[in-house]
Amino acid sequence: MNTTQSKAAFSKVTRGSRGQGLALTALCGAVVLLLSATAAAAAPTPAPSVTASAAAAPAATPVPSPTASAPVSGQATSSPSPAPMEQSQTAASSPSAAVPASASSVNGSDEKRAAMRQAVGPGGAQMGQLSPLVNGLTRTNVTTQGTWTPSFGVQGLDVSYYQPNVNWQQQWDMGARFAYVKASEGDYYTNPSFGAQYQGSRSVGMIRGAYHFAIPNWSAGSEQASFFVQNGGGWSADGSTLPPVLDIEFNPYAGKTINGVYMGNTCYDMSAAQLTAWVHDFGNTVRALTGRLPMIYTNTSWWKQCTGDPAGFGDYPLWIAAYPGAPSNDAGSIPASWGAYSVWQYSSTGPFAGDSNVWNGDYSSLQKFASDPAKGSFDSLSLVRDTTSAYLNVTGWSVDLSKPWVSTAVAITVTDPGNQTTGYSFLANGYRPDVDSVYGYGPAHGFGSNIQITSSGTYKVCAAAVGTNGNVDLGCKTLQASGVEPPVGSFDGLGQVRTPTSVSLRLTGWAVDRANAQSATFADAYVTDPDGQTTGYRMSAAAARPDVGTATGYGSNHGFDTLIGLNKAGTYHACVYAIGQYYNTSMGCKDIAVGANPEPKGYYDSLRIVQAPGAANLVATGWAFDPTNTGANIPVHVYVQSPDGTNVGTAFTANQPRPDLNSILGIAGDHGFSASLGIKSTGTYTACAYALSVAPLAPGNTPLGCRTIQVTNTPPTSGYLDSASVLSAAGQTSIKTTGWTYDPAVSGSSNPVHVYITYPDGTRQGYAFTANLPRADVNSAVGISGNHGYSTQVPITQRGKYTVCTYGIGIAQFSSGNSSLGCQLVTY
């Protein structure tokens, strides 16, 4: 804070840097320190932005994604140090580089430290608006008790010797859930009230921590860090101890000489580079001693003025001091070194004792902030491969608990079979909803990375979750990797093998997996057919090849001799690879032209119509065979186009004896066909026959030709009514008829005969019979076969004249109709 400005100038500052502290007692009764109104002034913190988000979660500079050639997902580095490998820092050349040359030598004695301790008094420099300098310049503002708190986050306070009697229970009841207590200053002062305040805050349930007031030009950062840790600045991952804090701000002793030591200007008479290096020196030492980087307490004005707002502090949590003139959720601008703040000190005038603060998050995140710096799990270590390389696959999750909302790094070290250790850094940003479900850290904390290896043997892999405030060991796993070295082999030949039923490519050669040479491996063939379609085949390389064993010393059972069936003619392109456990080796490619087999042969002899009672069929006859496989009965398909234009195909097999064909062509087997095809109407029919190939690689099926036939109605029935008479026997009177009838289209079959009788009363009744009695005379006279006679009896009771008529009924599919066989008159 600009404590050396004039009262008029300072009255314009309504919120700003942490105030300089000055509470010095007399040294030997003679030392009185006065405030200089002419000391160098620092620019006040700008007014708060009305658009700032009140409850923004703390952010930090994310770890850049490591670069590496695919498919390795992490870039190898040297063995990782305890610090995160991705951390970018402006480190000092030595721990004392940030301190003016004379500071350590002048101030390093016990006498100097004791004198300084006496000079600063029991409270030392005081932070915040309660600094005596600030209080003196703005008494009205800082003595008015504050009653407001920001409407977000978790409330807390910080105290020092100047708040000796804090009612901790009251602070808890008011809503405070965390507290920071001043532990030390420089390397000469410790807070006499530290123990009581530290334990008192914890006794009511608060999460508490310690802070150190830095005097950078007094001694080196590492020296003050060690002094701080030895006097209350330690840390443990117990969930109730906040990380240590470095309080670095306007020099509380600017322009003063104490015990002969000039205390420097507001920036401690140090350059921006010196101050930056001093802070890193302090931070790295604290991390080495406690496992965590400290949180930095500062204000924007001083940080920009004195450090130049450098990069490299994104891994340090930020505690920003800024005091609005009225209730607000806006902390104003923060140094560009950070993306967001973790804690905001918004008032030293209440409502809480000491300084009032707010944690920029919820209580759960505050608890995590007080726990392990990082957490994670090394879930698995396995071997994976692609066609050219082998990899160690490491999986798990990792989260930096100081910024769990950010995906951060995981450090992996790999010790290979040659005992060479290599470090890798991967960004743990994979999707792990299970981690988020259990811990609430968000889902983007998984890692699943591949690390290429080139030799077989035992690998030891260790993982560490990288935290801003220290790394956490996730354990180590070992894996025995075999089959990593690439295989060798030779693609010796590509030929073809033809049989009556198949055509195949023949691939020959050998392959050895050198990582496991005593066992047979595989050779994979990729064959591209004449249409450009590529198909892969796995071949066992286990055949005897004593020549290979003699030449290589890998053993004799590594040959392959494989047939691959083909279904089309043309040029084939085959490439073969020797397959290893992790690598595949190309053994080259070869081409071969494969010719087609001849098409089937055959002949379509005839097409005729065959009639049966109630049915009609077209019968196609001929023969067909496949010259490549003359012993096979091949399919014949007949397609019939009906008078209505429909076309129906029917499959048959050429499997009927044709000794004439066998004799003429000199082939064996039955190759004739007689295909019967039912028809339902008269008209013109066209039947086409095709011989189908059964041999592979035939160019197609052979058309045997087409034939046309005209189907017409057949003649009506013929016959005669020889006699009609009245027959009385055994008390029964009947009308008896005799005669004959047949259907010329199906003359070998008996057809029905219908008898119609007109009774004396004028009624007429018909009766059906079958003409199936022998009539040799008819057969001889007409020249037909079968039984075609009829003799019928129909009982009668009426007296009078009867007219009896008979009709021959047609049974052919396309019969022209029924015929009257005659009528006769009889009397009863």
Image (cartoon, rainbow, N blue to C red):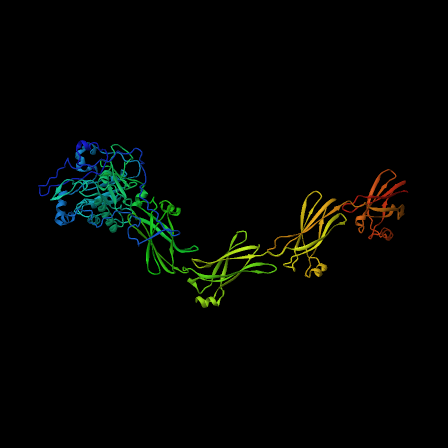
- Image spot of residue 730 (x, y percent): 88, 49
Locate residue 459: give its quadrant: bottom left
Task: In this rendered view, identify the residue nearer to me: 783 or 316.
Answer: 783
Q: Is residue 530 above or below residue 252?
A: below
Residue furthest out toward the right: 827
- Image spot of residue 174 (x, y percent): 27, 37
Q: Residue at x 42, y 62 (%)?
A: 514
Quarter of the image for the C terminus: give it. Answer: top right
Q: Residue at x 67, y 45 (%)?
A: 647
Q: Is residue 497 left or right of residue 619?
A: left
Q: Is residue 561 left or right of residue 364?
A: right
Asked whether residue 197 appears in the rendered view, the answer is: no
Q: Is residue 617 left or right of residue 292?
A: right
Locate residue 304: give its quadrant: top left
- Image spot of residue 143 (x, y percent): 20, 33
- Image spot of residue 206 (x, y percent): 27, 43
Quarter of the image for the N terminus: give it. Answer: top left
Locate residue 10: give its quadrant: top left
Q: Is residue 103 above or below residue 140?
A: below
Task: In this rendered view, identify the residue nearer to me: 804 or 704.
Answer: 704
Q: How many marks?
A: 0
Asked whether residue 763 appears in the rendered view, the answer is: yes
Q: Is residue 615 left or right of residue 626?
A: right
Task: In this rendered view, identify the residue nearer to me: 771 or 419.
Answer: 419
